[in-house]
Amino acid sequence: AQSVSQHNHHVILSEAASLELGCNYSYGGTVNLFWYVQYPGQHLQLLLKYFSGDPLVKGIKGFEAEFIKSKFSFNLRKPSVQWSDTAEYFCAVTLGDSWGKLQFGAGTQVVVTP
Amino acid sequence: DAGVIQSPRHEVTEMGQEVTLRCKPISGHDYLFWYRQTMMRGLELLIYFNNNVPIDDSGMPEDRFSAKMPNASFSTLKIQPSEPRDSAVYFCASSGGGRASYEQYFGPGTRLTVT
């Protein structure tokens, strides 16, 4: 069965610090990878997505993620966070031929302190 | 576009009562998804529709849950009878066809509390 693991459940960091959130999936076939963000009290929004091609994906708000197939990973990064990046971040996966079934990780709560 | 619209935003009900959650997808989107979010289980896909037809309901927890999509602009998720363990945030999402279907747009959610 496919599963998605997010390494950290809770991250606290200061403004201007760099952020990296880990995401691993367990499936050997073709996958489509996503990072969603949920700001406090808001709905989920897509940060970035990977289907194929360049494994380094740029998203909105300065986020990027790198797909490393050999490590089954899709880690999210941001070089310098802001207070407004405080949110919960979800990694999600669909299989190549089963796109409708987004499987989410448990989420990582990120708190950025001023 | 107004995005995915869900109602109500908050629902408090007593155990045993029927609860109906509503969703209006983004106009032109032909896929609709229902998710449930809890602290214990995270985000779970309950069911999804394509062109108003249920495609996969394997995530629906039990027979107390049912979902319908009578037309392209409206879907309901019903719980009858409700139980305290159904307390959660229920999200509706929609997406368009083709490659764009991989990107799902989420509604604001309905926070359900069953006492």
Image (spheres, rainbow, N blue to C red):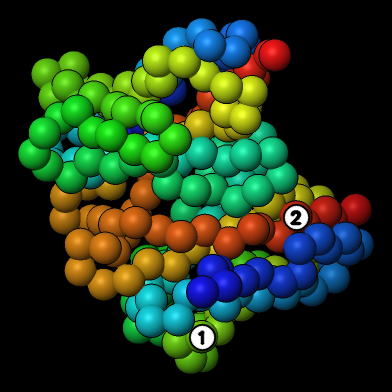
**Outermost left residue:** A53
Residue A2, given in percent of the width and then of the height, sits at 29, 37
Mark carried by residue B111: 2
Mark 2 or 1: the one toward you: 1
Q: Are marks 2 and 1 on the same chain?
A: yes
Q: Position of residue B88 (x, y in %)?
A: 71, 49
Camera-side residue: B61 or B32? B32
Q: Secondary structure at mark 1?
A: loop
Label 2 to label 1, Cα distance in Å? Answer: 21 Å
User: Residue A19: x and y, percent?
Assistant: 45, 14
Chain label for disc 2: B
Which chain does the residue under circle 1 lie in? B
Circle 2: residue type? Arg
The amino acid on which the numbered mark 1 sits, given as a three-letter code, is Ser
Residue that badge 1 annotates? B73
Q: Can I make out residue A46 in this image?
A: yes
Residue A92 vertical position relative to residue B115 in the rendered view, above or below: above
> Does residue B19 lie above or below B36 as drawn?
below
Q: Is residue A31 left or right of residue B3?
A: left
